[in-house]
Amino acid sequence: MQNPPPQFNQNHLLAALPPAELERLKSHLELVHMPLGDVLCESGGRLSYVYFPTSAIISLHYILENGSSSEVAGVGNEGMLGISLFMGGENTPTWATVQTAGYCYRLKGPLLLQEFNQGGPLQRVLLRYTQALITQISQTAVCNRHHTIEQQLCRWLLLTLDRLNSQELVMTQELIASMLGVRREGITEAAGKLQQAEIIRYRRGHITVLNRAGLQGHVCECYDVVKKEFERLFRDVRKS
Amino acid sequence: MQNPPPQFNQNHLLAALPPAELERLKSHLELVHMPLGDVLCESGGRLSYVYFPTSAIISLHYILENGSSSEVAGVGNEGMLGISLFMGGENTPTWATVQTAGYCYRLKGPLLLQEFNQGGPLQRVLLRYTQALITQISQTAVCNRHHTIEQQLCRWLLLTLDRLNSQELVMTQELIASMLGVRREGITEAAGKLQQAEIIRYRRGHITVLNRAGLQGHVCECYDVVKKEFERLFRDVRKS
DNA sequence: CGTAGTATGTACGCTAGCGCACAATACGGC
DNA sequence: GCCGTATTGTGCGCTAGCGTACATACTACG
């Protein structure tokens, strides 16, 4: 049922470390499976570990007083959960829940902090990632303001697709709606259009992308901005 | 016309540094006046300096392909402009323009980077600020999705007010609209309501806040979240 | 193989905010 | 003191998305 066991380098941040650095960390990196819906961190809660996803996807989101919610960013194999541990605040008002079940490597918080404070390549990688995350959150803010549900759905699907090896996401419309902070019916409608255009097919919690280029034709610019910024920052990190 | 000359400690980040550290930087900190509308950084552009506002306010915003725009965060005397210089990306897709004329201290980019890489108190302060900025951007994203123009206007006014000494903002409705990413008429309407409630008064580009508590009665929770997070992060930084 | 429960489809009235057009006002410069 | 321009006020019709309600259909599990 599960895919083959994950490798360290399936996480882009770990993969970006110099071999010697990674080698040093390996004995502390613990592989864990994260079930769908698991809450890793509530608003203001403290993380004991930082997580480097390989196949799992974690959603960073807010829950408002009136109960409505919105994702501000996702974290997959391109990133990590737990930046507040080295940024100094120890926690954030954000929730973190598992949006797609899968594996992560985790590292004890104090250990990460110690490594970060050495100021070596790990610090450089983590700070770059943090900047990329800021771009992602910013773009979410703008997208929320200016783009249609259909465009946002395409953005979200593409970003999620990029974090998976497969073309199929296990994901109900209800869940997508709560990520985007819109009504479930809004997703039904937008997804219906995409299905009619034979871009996706779905059945009860399984969405299959038939035509990735089609999604890119319906998406807003926000997807590209985020994508290119991640590429730029990690192209550079290898150089430096 | 201008207020008395700014002190270093009018910027909260500079004020949070240990005296010895600040003393060392002082000779490199250059006081500059920033006129309204000045563009400090375009999307992808590189900053030569980082800026620590004392009385100026800088807006971080995006401009979309279709010309519409949105602020993702503001930077006043509580913060700094130019985090990408030490985060490692050197630039961002964000624009930075002067939203309220006033003074900043600026520091040459390479010099800041050198200081940052010492790993001392300056690094700690800047990383904390970056985390607070992430919270601000995230909250903007959520607020854009879920709250009314009136609520957002109140949030924006309160945040701006906190960065000024005065109760009067020099600011057209057109400009506020482009910050929030809404129509100018939307601001006219929301501001009209606040004026009727005698919470604000305005005349051609000058908004005077008559009743701050009134604003707090109309604002959404987002203001408090951002405010408290800044307080928390800087309470801690003094301790550590 | 049947059924309970979850997931999706659809419909309808409602509201916030948009886009546009144009009127009315106030300020700054001469 | 007057005029031109920038700013604000107002009034449409329009659309996207909301809230609600309920119908349908899948699939997992007994």
Image (cartoon, coloured by chain):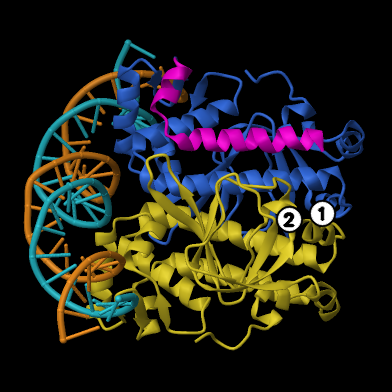
Chain colours: A blue, B yellow, C cyan, D orange
Q: Is residue D30 left or right of residue A232?
A: left
Q: Is residue A89 above or below residue A197?
A: below
Measured from the top left, where is residue A236 in percent x and y? 74, 36
- How many C-alpha atoms fall within 10 Å of the one at disc 1: few (<14), some, or many (≥20)? some
Measured from the top left, where is residue A90 in percent x and y? 70, 60
Closer-to-camera residue (B222/B163): B163
Measured from the top left, where is residue B32 in percent x and y? 64, 72
Q: Is residue B73 left or right of residue A18?
A: left
Q: Residue drawn 27% across and 84% down?
A: B198
Q: Which residues are magenta?
A: A211-240
In space, the residues marked 2 and 1 are separated at their CA atoms by 7 Å
Dot 2: chain letter: A
Q: Is residue B211 left or right of residue A133?
A: left
**Circle number at residue A85:** 2
Q: Quadrant of residue A107?
A: top right
Q: Is residue B52 visible?
A: yes
Closer-to-camera residue (B223/B179): B179
Q: Are marks 2 and 1 in contact (CB under 8 Å)?
A: yes
Mark 1 secondary-structure assignment = helix
Closer-to-camera residue (B128/A34): B128
Q: Is residue B87 above or below residue B238?
A: above
Residue wearing tag 1: A113
The amino acid type, in three-letter code, at marker 1 is Leu
Q: Residue drawn 87% across and 47% down?
A: A120
Mark 2 secondary-structure assignment = helix
Dot 1: chain letter: A
Q: Is residue B235 above or below residue A220?
A: below
Question: In the image, is residue B116 part of the stretch drawn in magenta?
Answer: no
The amino acid type, in three-letter code, at marker 2 is Leu
Q: Is residue A85 above or below residue A107?
A: below
Q: Is residue B190 left or right of residue B67?
A: left
- How many C-alpha atoms fall within 10 Å of the one at disc 2: few (<14), some, or many (≥20)? many
